[in-house]
Image: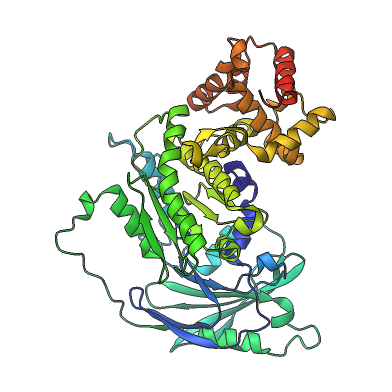
């Protein structure tokens, strides 16, 4: 899973975020949950798991689901609590006057990228449930909101939206029921999703099912009270807190009970997990990640020296199993991913699916993407470079001092492609778009790894120009942010036919 692949899955991830995959034929009971720091209580399904909102889900206060993605049921049950804040200073007639300078301009002050991003997020954040739905799904046919009906929520007048068949998962229609109400400051939305067949049976569409009835009971149970504000500990100056302490505070803010936060020794990473102590193998996996990440990072820094000091602490979320991984948003068929939108690397111990060693390979691949994001910013590299380097680092062996060797995942595929003459010629691979690369992912991923591995090998050093290709490409890309210029500069003066022949010989001889 990669930066580019994440971008390709934007719509799918948006739906996954709202309609998390889960299971259960019915909601078999409700249990009251109280959130003193936020000033509300709500009755939620007893058997559902509480899932942490992702760091960039600013409006999401809490969410629950029962995930059976790994079991392939295709049913979807989920609950999300959202809170929307009206935009400060918004008035009906406020407009920018002709000639008025944009915010931050004309006063001699150039806003920082961070301030500009904050301003952009403030301008574009949703200020109500209807605004949220419009921004996320308004451009997709069939995703329009129907008119709501009145519903008493606690002691307040609220609205109820019934969105029949507005999404699907593995061919199964999923419907959504939403209750909205204002506490005088914020608008709150209680969002449930469940199989359409459970909420709106075909034989009796107007009949209130048990699932629908309990969802309404949950929505109506929302109550508000004075929030308990935690006082700042004496002697703590937030303005002078370390980056690690700030990150830990931000991570803990939305964590459900029992989640653990582990900083790494050099304070470059924070590991977050919810693994019970009785799951000793998964606990060992999480603690190995604490040990391994800062060691592998030295190799990232050697190959890609940071263009500026990295002060950001990277967050790595270790899910306790495949189900929790998919609950949180992990795409199907993956064992880990880096999300540049949230800055998080998310992974789980996939030893049941292919061995723990495979999980470390995924970790080193995705941690490379995460490191590069903070070292040089989000650059859009060709897939052969982006994925090839990720797989290059996947060949790291922790038991041998993180020495990078042949990545076994790719060797068989690329050997077969070359022997059967189904490989992509380098004159084309160097220029492949993401779509072309993913059209034949098995072969292209294997070739991307083999290409990077070859260009960094002793065999490539027989030609003085070839080992320079990777550095010239990357340096040009960072400077110009132009993939076309980067690959043109990298291949300037290179005999591509000669390079392709040597590359194929390298593969046939067993990557030597």
Q: Residue at x 49, y 67 (%)?
A: 128
User: Which quadrant is the C terminus positioned in?
Assistant: top right
The foreground one among 188 and 497 is 497
Can residue 87 be seen here? The reply is: yes
Q: Tell whether 308 sits left or right of 138.
A: left
Q: Tell whether 399 sits left or right of 210.
A: left
Q: Position of residue 286 (x, y in %)?
A: 46, 56
Q: Quadrant of residue 465?
A: top right
Q: Is residue 271 above or below residue 449?
A: below
Q: Position of residue 193 (x, y in %)?
A: 62, 74
The foreground one among 352 and 52 is 352
Q: Is residue 399 above or below residue 200?
A: above
Which residue is most to the front? 399
Q: Tell whether 189 sits left or right of 264.
A: right
Can residue 163 be seen here? The reply is: no
Q: Is residue 126 above or below residue 192?
A: above
Q: Position of residue 233 (x, y in %)?
A: 19, 64
The foreground one among 147 and 112 is 112
Q: Quadrant of residue 411?
A: top right
Q: Position of residue 434 (x, y in %)?
A: 68, 37
Q: Residue at x 41, y 47 (%)?
A: 291
The foreground one among 14 and 49 is 49
Count of marks, rendered view: 0
Q: Residue at x 46, y 64 (%)?
A: 127
Scheme by which the image is coloured: rainbow
Which residue is most to the left? 235
């Amino acid at each position: 899973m990669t930066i580019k692949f994440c971008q390709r899955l934007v719509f799918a991830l948006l739906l996954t975020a709202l309609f998390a995959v889960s299971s259960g034929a019915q909601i078999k009971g409700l249990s009251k949950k109280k959130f003193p720091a936020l000033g509300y209580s709500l009755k939620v399904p007893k058997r559902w798991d509480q899932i942490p909102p992702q760091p960039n889900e600013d409006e999401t206060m809490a969410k629950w689901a029962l995930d059976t993605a790994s079991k392939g049921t295709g049913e979807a049950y989920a609950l999300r609590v959202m809170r929307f804040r009206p935009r400060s200073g918004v008035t009906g007639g406020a407009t920018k006057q002709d000639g008025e300078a944009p915010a931050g301009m004309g006063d001699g002050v150039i806003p920082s990228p961070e301030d500009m991003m904050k301003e952009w997020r403030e301008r574009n954040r949703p200020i109500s449930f209807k605004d949220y739905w419009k921004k996320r799904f308004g451009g997709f046919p069939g995703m329009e909101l129907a008119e709501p009906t009145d519903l008493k929520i606690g002691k307040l007048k609220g609205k109820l939206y019934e969105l029949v068949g507005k999404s699907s998962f593995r061919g199964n229609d999923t419907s959504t029921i939403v209750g909205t109400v204002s506490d005088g400051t914020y608008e709150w939305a209680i969002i449930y999703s469940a199989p359409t067949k459970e909420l709106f049976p075909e034989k009796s569409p107007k009949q209130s099912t048990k699932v629908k009835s309990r969802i309404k009971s949950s929505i109506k149970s929302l109550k508000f009270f004075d929030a308990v504000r935690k006082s700042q500990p004496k002697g703590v100056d937030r303005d002078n807190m370390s980056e690690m302490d700030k990150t830990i505070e931000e991570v803990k803010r939305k964590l459900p009970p029992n989640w653990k936060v582990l900083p790494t020794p050099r304070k470059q990473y924070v590991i977050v997990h919810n693994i019970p102590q009785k799951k000793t193998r998964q606990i060992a996996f999480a603690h190995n990640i604490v040990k391994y990440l800062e060691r592998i990072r030295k190799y990232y820094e050697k190959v890609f020296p940071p263009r500026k000091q990295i002060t950001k602490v990277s967050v790595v979320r270790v899910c306790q199993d495949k189900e929790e991984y998919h609950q949180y948003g992990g795409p199907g068929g993956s064992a880990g991913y880096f999300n540049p939108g949230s800055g998080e690397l998310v992974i789980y111990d996939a030893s049941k699916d292919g061995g723990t060693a495979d999980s470390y390979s995924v970790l080193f691949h995705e941690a490379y993407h995460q490191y590069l994001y903070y070292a040089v910013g989000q650059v859009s590299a060709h897939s052969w470079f982006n994925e090839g380097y990720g797989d290059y680092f996947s060949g790291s062996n922790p038991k041998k001092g993180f020495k990078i060797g042949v990545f076994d995942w790719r060797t068989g595929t690329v050997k077969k492609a070359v022997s059967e003459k189904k490989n992509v010629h380098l004159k084309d691979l160097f220029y492949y778009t993401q779509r072309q690369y993913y059209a034949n992912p098995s072969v292209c991923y294997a070739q991307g790894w083999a290409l990077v591995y070859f260009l960094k090998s002793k065999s490539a050093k027989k030609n003085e120009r070839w080992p320079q290709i990777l550095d010239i490409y990357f340096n040009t890309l960072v400077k110009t942010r132009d993939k076309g210029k980067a690959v043109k500069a990298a291949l300037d003066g290179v005999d591509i036919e000669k390079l392709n022949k040597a590359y194929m010989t390298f593969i046939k001889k067993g990557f030597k």
